[in-house]
Amino acid sequence: MSILSPEMSSFAPSSKKQKTTISKSDGPFFSDIGKIEYKPDAGPEQTLVFKHYNAKEVVMGRTMEDWLRFSVCFWHSFRGTGADAFGFPTIDRPWDDGTHSMENAKRRLRAAFEFFARLGNKYWTFHDRDIAPEGSTLAESNANLDEMVDLAYDLQRQKGVKLLWVTCNLFAHSRYMNGAATNPDAHVSIYAAAQVKKGLEIAHRLGAENFVFWGGREGYQSLLNTDIRAELDHMAAFFRMVVAYKHKIGFKGQLLIEPKAKEPTRHQYDYDVQTVMSFLHQYDLSQHFKINVEPNHTTLAGHPYEHDIQLASAYGFLGSVDANTGSPDLGWDTDQFPMDIRNCTVVMKIIMEQGGLSPGGLNFDAKVRRESVAVEDLFIAHIGAMDAFARGLRNAANIISDGHMKTALENRYTSWGSGLGARIKKGEATLEDCEKYIMQKGDPSHTSGKQEHFEAMLNYYL
Ligand code: XLS
Ligand code: CA
Ligand code: CA
C-alpha cells in the first residue's frame, strides 16, 4: 500500500513557498510546562522532571552536561507529523500550520528554541531542508536558507544553544532517487555537491561543531544496473571536494559519516562502522572523517546495540552518537527514544573510557510514537532519555572506578603480555617459532570465557 504524500515524513523537504492558510499562535508554546527541574525524590508518575540528570553535577571530574552533550534533533521533534507508510499525520502542533511558508518555518524554529530553553539541552541538529523550504531553483533554496540561518544565529545566541551538527538532505527530493554522490548521472551528483557547498557555509556561520553525511540513497536496489566500483570512486571524489572546501572556508567542524545497513535502499554503501572505516582507508580519507554512530542502524546491520560504538571507539573513529533505539523484534528503523538503562550504561562506559565525545554529542535522532500526540509527550520522551543516559553515566562511572570489569577483561589477554605472545605482537616472531613452541608445550588448556560472570558483573551496576 502506498499512500505517501510529501507531507508524510519528517524528512520530506517542502517543495514551494506558500501562503499561510491556517493561523497559528506565535507562542509561547510551552508555558504550561515551564522549565524542567531536577527532582531526585520525584515519584514514578512524575515524568516531567529529571530524577537523575543534574546538569551541573560533577561525575568523574566533569559535569553531567559535559559528558552527555545532549542534542535535540529538529526534523523529528519539530517536523515530525506521525505519518507513516500506512497512515496520515496524527500529530498537530500549535506552531505548525502545515504550509511551506517562511512564516511557518520561522514559527517552528522559534518554538524549537523555546523548547530547548525549557528542556535545558545545549545542542541541536538539523538538515538544511528541515529549517527552510526548498525553492524552485537552488538560488531560491539558498536564499530561503540564508533567511532562516539569520534567525537561527540570533536564537542560538539568545538561548545559549549551540549547533552540534548540520547535514544536507540529499535523499528526499525526487532528483536523488538514484543516489546523490553515487548517482549514475553526474548532473545529479553535481547538484548534490552544490547543495553541500551551501551546507558547509551555513555550518560555518552557525558555528557547527560537526558536519554529518548520511548516505540516504547511496546504495543500490539491484546489482544488475549498478557499477559499484564506479559509484564508490565517485563518492570518494565527492568527499575530496568537501574536504577541500571545508579547508578553503576555514570551517573547523569535524566531518562525520553515519553508517546505515539498509533502508531506504536495499543495500547502503555505508553499511556499518567497519565498512565505513575500510572505505575511508581505501580512498585515503581517514584523517578527515570520523563516524556518527546510530545504534538503531547498528542493530539493522545485525550487530548488538553497542557494537559499532565500541568498534569505532577502538580505532579512534567515534565522533558522535545518534542516541536512539529500534525495536529488536522489528527489522526497520523506528528511531525510538533510548530508554534502556543497560544500553545507556554500556554506551557511556565506552564514551568515558575514550575520554568523552566532544566535539560530538548524544543527539536524539528519535521521534515520539505517532500515537503520542500530546505536546507534553515531546518533553517526556526527551526527559526520559536524558534520565536514562544520566543513569548510564552514573553506572559507567561506578564500573570504571571499581575497575573489576576492566581487570576481568585484561585477565583474558595476559598471555599476550609476555613470552612468545608479546613477541608475535611486536612482529618479532615467525611461524617456525610457533611450531617449536607447540612441540615443546603441547596443546593449550581450555580457559573459561566467563561470559556469565561478565553479565552478572554488569547487572550489579544497573
Ligand atoms: C536516517 C538517518 C538520518 C541522519 C541524518 O535514518 O538517521 O536521520 O541522521 O540525515
Ligand atoms: Ca541518524
Ligand atoms: Ca535512523
Image (cartoon, grey):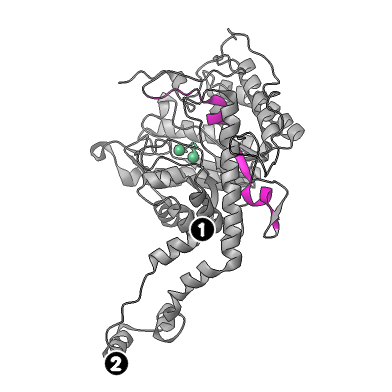
- The CB of the residue at mark 1 lies under 8 Å from ligand 2: no
Q: Is residue 14 left or right of residue 105?
A: left
Q: Are marks 1 and 2 in contact (CB under 8 Å)?
A: no
Q: Position of residue 403 (x, y in %)?
A: 56, 69
Please identify the quarter of the rendering in which residue 446 is found: bottom left
Q: Is residue 320 something that shows in the picture?
A: yes
Residue sitting nearer the eye, 223 or 216: 216
User: Element under label 1?
Assistant: helix
- Tell me what residue is drawn at x 42 percent, y 31 percent: 188
- Inspect the magenta stretch and tell me whether residue 66 lies in it: yes
**Amino acid carrying mark 1 in the image:** Ser
- Inspect the magenta stretch and tell me whether residue 207 lies in it: no
Q: How many marks?
A: 2
Q: Which range is magenta? A: 62-85
**Amino acid carrying mark 2 in the image:** Gln
Q: Is residue 332 left or right of residue 409?
A: left
User: Element under label 2?
Assistant: helix
Q: Position of residue 456 (x, y in %)?
A: 45, 62
| Location of mark 2 (residue) | 440
Residue sitting nearer the eye, 162 or 197: 162
**Disc number at residue 313?**
1
Q: Residues within 10 Å of mark 2 (few under 14, many from 20)?
A: few
